[in-house]
Amino acid sequence: MTDRIELAWVPEHHRYELRDDGKRIGMTLYRPQEKGAVYAFDHTEVDEGYSGLGLAGRLVTFALDDVRSRGVKIRPYCPYVRAFLRRHPEYQDLVVEGFVAPED
């Protein structure tokens, strides 16, 4: 099933998406801040039928790699993105200096 999953950036809706045969099955939402120099990640979700397949991690990896390629920093308000960053310290450089995460 996961071999047909696509990842996409959808800037007009401020999100990154997971798609299965063109149908959106997950997303991570962000709000551009500071004239697009920072993305505040607010929410990540994957449809219930696709949970447990590691797709949220693939989605956030895709989003953060894209953010890095654009020279954008992040504010991880989304609990999933914060947990991902704890497991993957190689992305910590993307977090805005001085950002204090809300309590999980």
Image (cartoon, rainbow, N blue to C red):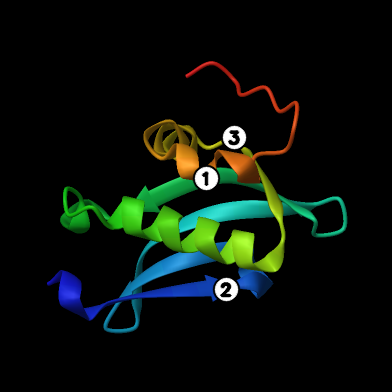
Tag 3, which secondary structure? loop
Q: Give the CA distance from mark 1 to mark 2.
A: 21 Å
Q: Quadrant of the N terminus?
A: bottom left
Give neighbour class at mark 2: few <14, some 14-19, many 20+ (Cα, 10 Å). few
> Label 1 is placed on what type of residue?
Tyr
Residue highlighted by disc 2:
10
User: Does residue 54 appear to the left or right of 85 in the view shown?
Assistant: left
Give neighbour class at mark 3: few <14, some 14-19, many 20+ (Cα, 10 Å). some
> Label 3 is placed on what type of residue?
Tyr
Ranked by sequence position, the earlier of labels 1 and 2 is 2
Q: Which mark is residue 65?
A: none
Q: Position of residue 99 (x, y in %)?
A: 71, 28
User: Does residue 31 appear to the left or right of 3 in the view shown?
Assistant: right
Tag 2, which secondary structure? strand
Q: Position of residue 92 (x, y in %)?
A: 56, 38
Tag 1, which secondary structure? helix
Q: Residue at x 70, y 49 (%)?
A: 73
Q: Position of residue 52 (x, y in %)?
A: 16, 48
Q: Residue at x 57, y 73 (%)?
A: 10
**Callout in the foreground (3, 1):** 1
Quarter assignment of residue 100: top right
Ranked by sequence position, the earlier of labels 3 and 2 is 2
Residue highlighted by disc 3:
77
Quarter assignment of residue 87: top left
Depth check: 71 or 48 in front?
71
Q: Residue at x 27, y 83 (%)?
A: 21
Residue highlighted by disc 1:
91
Q: Residue at x 46, y 37 (%)?
A: 89
28 vs 5: above or below:
above
The outermost residue toward the top is 103
> Label 2 is placed on what type of residue?
Val
